[in-house]
Image (spheres, coloured by chain):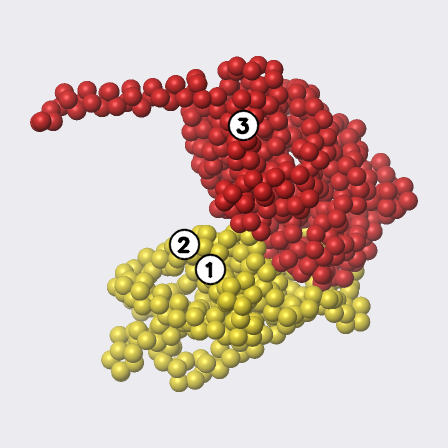
């Protein structure tokens, strides 16, 4: 086996994994506050990318450096709005129904946005050149390198957020909403802010992936990878997501390079599915997630 | 007047009879030919359907605006099957009930699912750039008509062009084939493997998981294989990602090619300047140059009767739509020549479609002859290269490797004749 090729696959896999981890971090943000696995995270990433396209060249003509932050603000409002208009009405309903609601939202957005903006792939140019970058004999994709770097920075920022005063509030809300109310925490607002922040993070993911592949409905498929990472890392652990992202990215990339030639292809997506199944069977709370123990 | 049960039932019966009478009269007297363009506007084939359908509708408006063809006007029914087989079957049955004599599903899985029905009901099913490649054999599939070069022929055209470019030999060259891991993506594999054995080149296939939005681990392998030529074979986001990764991996764009499924909008997504030199198989002339497109612009679009945005007129996929509509209408013209008074049925149109002779749509397509044996039309196409603004033809219309292609067609069509699969 070609050692340089393996190194290339490893490096690209790690950075791709970090880009996936950013989508998963948005899921963790919501789970840590409201205890719900948001199955609309992929669709939110897609929506954010469509909003950037609409604000930038294809729509209002804003420069990309203005369109991206503006889209994040818009998506923050969208995320908070989803919580206010949909999720809050579900208070008191079984958790499974709330999760089904997020799944419904995913399907709804996946159908709505291509219908509104057209189903063809849209160009999203954030100024990263496509020209190959060689480090010795090793080729690294600039888009993946920068995308992975930005994702890493944002995930580290999330870790800081969880150690801030607001992070402590979010953890308190996640642990016990009634107790949080009783000590004066505005639970609904904390959850709405978490949804807003998660949607803004999803926008960044959508932009980074949109710059790599173009913008279309398939961005919503990021959900599967994000889910695998969040389950492996632990649905309530940002550090876990960071490490699991690297593991999943690396495993997928190496499987494509090593197993595909042997079995004739198609192993990349199998990796994510295997990770989900094996983690749930062996360690349901993930590598770094908190194990919930109930006294009976 | 009080509404009794009896008057209501009588009224309903009269209304039902009345609603049927004019339809029968219309079928008998109007001299219309009904086409059902049931296509995927909302799911998988969205990258092509809107432009393709726009081209078809504009051409039919042009023909009807000139009084029709052979004394017949064309009715085009548009519906969305969303690449979903139950919906497609429902749309098919509706089209059949309404008297459609031709359907164009533009979807490989839907076309495959509808083959037995189309054959049994004798409704002409057009499977241009989709469906089964072995449907080129008209003796096995009398009512399934690709009318265009199938995927095996497209692969054969590309390999022949590579050979021409490399001084007449591909001996010891390396050709990489990056494809979506679906039946459509795998379709050219047997032909490419046979041609590799015949021409002596090393053939490497790299499948990617559909829809192909992450191919970052595939293309480093392609680059390190040091290919002399690379062919990428997918659709929609798979094509733009493949091309982007090819650029990022520093592949020589002048030695990278695809099938008919590459369009101006794909080049725009990847970057018009970065993809200069990329090739594709062209089944018809693209752009505004063809006389038919000029006529559409003046008689349809300028008159405000266009079916979609004007800036899409002349794109590759728009022109594919015009090309197919022109072939269908030519089939009607021939059918009307053979039997001027109809009746308009599937077999009536089938006789016309299978007698199209050297039809070139006023220079827009290669001279195409459809016979009861050959539903592919000779397997002609040309190779075009992206120059940063448009695809520029590099060859004249040509056909290549048809001996190997037809061996494969007959192998599978004989199997179909035996066991219906």
**Quadrant of the image occupied by residue B395:** top right
**Residue B256 to residue A15: above or below:** above
A67 vs B258, nearest the viewer: A67
Q: Residue furthest bottom?
A: A165
Residue occupying the point 58% across, 51% down: B311
B20 vs A199, nearest the viewer: B20
Q: Which chain is yellow?
A: A
Residue pointed to by mark 2? A108
Q: Secondary structure at mark 2?
A: helix
Q: Indicate the colour of chain B.
A: red
Q: Residue furthest left?
A: B2
Residue occupying the point 74% across, 37% down: B381
Image quarter of the C terminus of chain B = top right
Horizontally, residue B238 falls left or right of residue B382, namely: left
Q: Are marks 3 and 2 on the same chain?
A: no
**Quadrant of the image occupied by residue B111:** top right
B48 vs A110, nearest the viewer: B48
A66 vs B137, nearest the viewer: A66
Image quarter of the N terminus of chain B = top left
Determine contact: label 1, label 2, CB under 8 Å: yes
Question: Mark 2 packing: few (<14 Cα in 10 Å), some, or many (20+)?
Answer: few
Chain of the residue that carries numbered disc 2 in the rendered image = A
Q: Nearer the viewer, mark 3 or mark 2?
A: 3
- Mark number, residue A43: 1
Determine contact: label 3, label 1, CB under 8 Å: no
Q: Secondary structure at mark 3?
A: loop
- Mark number, residue B68: 3
């Amino acid at each position: 086996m070609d050692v340089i090729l393996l190194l290339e696959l490893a490096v690209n896999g790690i950075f791709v994994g970090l880009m996936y981890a950013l989508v998963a971090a948005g899921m963790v943000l919501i789970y840590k506050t409201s205890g719900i696995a948001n199955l609309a995270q992929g669709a939110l990433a897609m929506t954010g990318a469509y909003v950037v396209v609409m604000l930038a060249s294809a729509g209002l003509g804003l420069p990309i450096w203005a369109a991206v932050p503006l889209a994040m603000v818009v998506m923050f409002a969208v995320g908070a709005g989803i919580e206010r208009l949909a999720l809050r009405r579900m208070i008191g309903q079984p958790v499974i129904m709330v999760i089904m609601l997020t799944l419904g939202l995913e399907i709804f957005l996946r159908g709505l946005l291509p219908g509104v903006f057209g189903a063809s792939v849209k160009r999203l140019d954030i100024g990263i050149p496509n020209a190959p970058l060689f480090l010795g004999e090793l080729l690294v994709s600039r888009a993946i390198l920068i995308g992975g770097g930005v994702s890493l920075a944002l995930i580290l920022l999330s870790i800081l957020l969880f150690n801030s005063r607001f992070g402590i509030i979010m953890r308190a809300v996640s642990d016990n909403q009634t107790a949080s109310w009783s000590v004066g925490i505005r639970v609904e607002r904390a959850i709405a802010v978490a949804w807003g922040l998660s949607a803004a993070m999803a926008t960044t993911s959508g932009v980074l992936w949109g710059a790599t592949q173009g913008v279309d409905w398939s961005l919503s498929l990021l959900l599967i990878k994000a889910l695998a990472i969040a389950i492996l890392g632990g649905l309530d652990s940002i550090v876990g997501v960071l490490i699991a992202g690297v593991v999943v990215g690396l495993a997928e990339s190496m499987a494509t390079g090593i197993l595909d030639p042997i079995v004739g292809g198609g192993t990349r997506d199998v990796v994510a599915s295997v990770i989900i199944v094996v983690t749930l069977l062996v360690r349901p709370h993930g590598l770094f997630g908190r194990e919930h123990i109930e006294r009976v | 007047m009080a509404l009794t049960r009896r008057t209501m039932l009588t009224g309903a019966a009269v209304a039902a009879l009345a609603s049927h009478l004019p339809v029968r009269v219309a079928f008998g007297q109007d001299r219309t030919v009904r086409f059902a363009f049931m296509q995927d506007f909302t799911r998988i084939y969205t990258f092509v359907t809107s432009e393709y359908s726009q081209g078809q509708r504009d051409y039919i408006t042009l023909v009807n605006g000139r009084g029709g063809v052979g004394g017949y006007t064309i009715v085009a029914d548009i519906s969305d099957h969303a690449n979903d087989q139950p919906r497609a079957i429902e749309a098919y049955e509706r089209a059949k009930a309404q008297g459609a004599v031709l359907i164009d599903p533009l979807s490989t899985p839907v076309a495959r699912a509808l083959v037995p029905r189309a054959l049994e009901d004798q409704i002409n099913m057009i499977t241009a750039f989709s469906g089964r490649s072995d449907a080129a054999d008209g003796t096995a599939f009398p009512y399934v008509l690709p009318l265009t070069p199938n995927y095996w022929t497209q692969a054969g055209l590309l390999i022949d062009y590579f050979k021409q470019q490399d001084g007449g030999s591909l001996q010891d060259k390396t050709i990489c084939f990056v494809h979506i891991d679906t039946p459509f993506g795998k379709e050219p594999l047997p032909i490419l493997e046979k041609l590799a054995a015949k021409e002596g080149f090393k053939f490497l296939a790299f499948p990617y998981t559909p829809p192909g939005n992450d191919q970052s681990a595939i293309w480093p392998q392609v680059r390190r294989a040091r290919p002399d030529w690379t062919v990428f074979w997918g659709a929609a986001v798979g094509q733009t990602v493949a091309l982007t990764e090819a650029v990022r991996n520093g592949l020589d764009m002048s030695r990278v090619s695809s099938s008919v499924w590459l369009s101006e909008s794909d080049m725009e997504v990847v970057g018009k300047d970065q993809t200069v030199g990329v090739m594709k198989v062209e089944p018809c002339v693209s752009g505004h140059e063809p006389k038919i497109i000029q006529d559409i612009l003046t008689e349809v679009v300028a008159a405000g009767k266009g079916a979609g945005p004007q800036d899409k007129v002349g794109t590759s996929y728009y022109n594919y739509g015009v090309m197919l509509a022109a072939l269908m209408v030519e089939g009607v013209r021939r059918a009307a020549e053979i039997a001027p008074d109809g009746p308009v049925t599937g077999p009536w149109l089938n006789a016309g479609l299978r007698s199209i002779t050297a039809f070139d749509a006023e220079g827009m397509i290669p001279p195409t002859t459809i016979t009861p044996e050959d539903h592919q039309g000779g397997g002609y196409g040309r190779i075009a290269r992206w120059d940063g603004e448009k695809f520029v033809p590099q060859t004249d219309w040509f056909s290549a490797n048809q001996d190997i292609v037809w061996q494969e067609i007959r192998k599978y069509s004989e199997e179909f004749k035996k066991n219906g699969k």
